[in-house]
Amino acid sequence: MGAYSNLLTTPGVARIIAAQLTARFPFGMLSLAFLLHVEHITHSYGAAGAVLAATSVGQAISGPLTSRWMGQWGMRPVLLLTLAVCVSSLVVFAVVTMTLPFYMLVGFLAGVSVPPVQPAVRTIYPKMVNSTQLTPLFSLDASAQEIIWVAGPVITTFVGTQISTVAAILVAATFLIGGGIWFIASPEVGRVRIPRSKRSFGKVLTRPTVLLSTITGFLLIGTCAAVEAGVISAFGDGSPNSGFVLAIFAVGSLIGGLALGHLPVGPWALPIRMAVVVVGIALTSVMPTNFWWLSATLLVAGVGIAPALAVMFAIISSSVRFSDTAEAYGWSGTGQLIGAALGSAVAGIMIDRLGTLGGLLVAGGFAVLGVLVPVIFQRVLPDLRGTDASPLADTEPVPVQAS
């Protein structure tokens, strides 16, 4: 834990972590809030899954595109524009009663305008700490973000079931406004300038490490999305139990990230961490609607999530130039969001047919593939034990603006 305490005493690190977590907090609420809202109106998990899929597809499109824009126009202009559009879309989604196609359209607009906070902050990190602190910082970031998934579902479930699903979405929009402004106003956002990439759009995906991380992230987040849909179906949209179980799932990830995040990243680190997720998900099928069993097994599954994400962040950072890091993280986020879209959609269909077990079986399938892919392509995974995980240097000086 000493590595983490040293990080938090580094000037600006604690503040930027807190700001970006607050800005991203709504996205621990919105999937569940959209699911509850649309299911309440249409009485169909399949319809709700379709809306989540449309939203995630919008985010998938925006991820690498807005991340690259930050290198062309600067972080703050892009963040401000997307923040304004996203908040407006959420308000419309909440207060206007629509048919399913229009919910999908507005959900897509909300997704395509999500502020690129995650690529921005992970591009900033290497400029805030020395090379030996970078991998622990990625782990701390991946662990801390589980606060989003611990508190977000609980708040959403409580507000959505005890007040209204409209209120749940508006609460998320309020967090987005406050957190987004705080992050945009952070000195580091104005101080670090991402240089314009000289490579064509999408070229960074030819890096095997970026592509492998994108695919594995797609499978990991697809697993989580299917678990979320399955848990909601297990207890119904009127029970707070689903929020508590999903919070425990996130607590497992937080525990895993803090316990394992400081370990060196070897070439087998990613498949081993993904295997932990498989074990926990497989056990859920024994008693898929039992609150205590789901809580215990998803706690186990969660232990592998943050450590796996930290490995993905580190291997991307170590294999691309600084000017390409934001776009690389954007593509990684796109993979995760496509996984969320497909995981939610397929789980929703299987839940309508087989009940809760169907959603958990979908989660298990995604998780197994999440182990097999890095095992099959293990040779492209770098050995970062004792090496620098910082981005490769660009051939020209990186401008740093005075705050």
Image (spheres, rainbow, N blue to C red):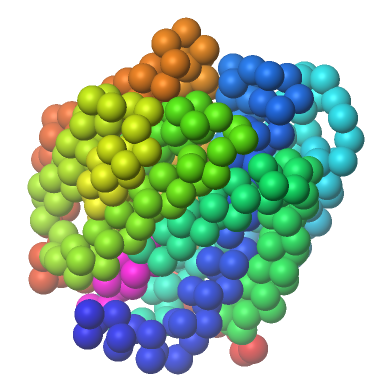
**Can residue 296 be seen at all in this image of the molecule?**
yes
Q: Quadrant of the C terminus?
A: bottom right
For this view, does 276 lie left or right of residue 15? Answer: left
Identify the residue at horizontal 46%, vertical 56% (top origin): 150
User: Is residue 288 shown above or below 273?
Assistant: above
The image quarter in which residue 350 lies: top left
Q: Position of residue 305 (x, y in %)?
A: 30, 49
Identify the residue at horizontal 42%, vertical 73% (top origin): 125
Viewer-side residue, 183 vs 321: 183
For this view, does 79 lie left or right of residue 365? Answer: right
**Can residue 309 be seen at all in this image of the molecule?**
no
The image quarter in which residue 372 lies: top left
Identify the residue at horizontal 62%, vertical 64% (top origin): 23
The image quarter in which residue 205 lies: top left
User: Is residue 326 shown above or below 287?
Assistant: below
Viewer-side residue, 78 vs 395: 78
Residue 137 falls inside the magenta stretch:
yes
Q: Position of residue 5 (x, y in %)?
A: 30, 86
Q: Quadrant of the N terminus?
A: bottom left
Identify the residue at horizontal 23%, vertical 47% (top origin): 300
Q: Which residues are magenta?
A: 132-142
Look at the magenta stretch and give its main secondary structure.
helix
Q: Position of residue 317 (x, y in %)?
A: 33, 60
Q: Position of residue 233 (x, y in %)?
A: 50, 26
For this view, does 364 lie left or right of residue 259? Answer: right
Residue 226 falls inside the magenta stretch:
no
